[in-house]
Image (cartoon, helix red, strand yellow):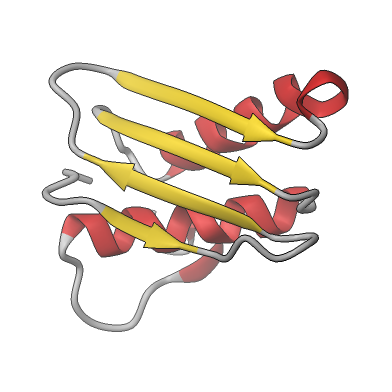
Amino acid sequence: MEIKSAAVAGTLESSDVQVTVEPSGSGISIIIDSIVVNQYGRQIKAVVQNTLKELDVRSAKVTIVDKGALDCTIQARVECAAYRASGFEGSIPWGGAGK
């Protein structure tokens, strides 16, 4: 999946996460701002990386502003932002069903 423009998914409410995906010159860059980064930063990064890998995103800057979201919420927000940023039109195949 090619990231063509910046896109956002999610909110800054408690137990949610706001994900911004935008084009990058090379590779994957992940920035995490989280209230639980000391406890779960590595897990949040792993969820983001795995989700991008499933979507075949090879180049993107991803900014995560986490307010205590569960892994499934992080995955859904990353998927949504990536599809929006790619300019995808149609019905989104949630959960990696598009592979």
Q: Is residue 27 above or below residue 7?
A: above
In the image, what residue occupies the spot 24% across and 82% down?
A: 90
In-front residue for pair 65/84: 65
User: Which residue reaches farthest bottom?
Assistant: 91
Number of labels in the image equals: 0
Q: Provide residue 19's location: percent of width, then percent of height.
A: 48, 50
The residue sitting at 19% across, 27% down in the picture is 24
Instruction: Give coordinates of residue 2: x percent, y percent.
Output: 16, 43
Residue 88 in which image quadrant: bottom left
Residue that appears at 70% across and 60% down? 16
User: What percent of the width, then of the height, locates residue 30?
Assistant: 46, 25
**Horizontally, is 42 left or right of 92 in the view?**
right
Residue 17 position, x and y percent, is: 63, 54
- State which quadrant residue 58 falls in: top left
Q: Is residue 76 above or below residue 42?
A: below
Outermost residue, right side: 39
Residue drawn 43% across the image and 63% down it: 80
Is residue 80 positioned above or below 60 on the image? below
Horizontal side, residue 72 vs residue 2: left or right:
right
- 10 or 13, which lies in front? 13
From the viewer's perspective, tell me whether residue 42 is left or right of residue 28: right
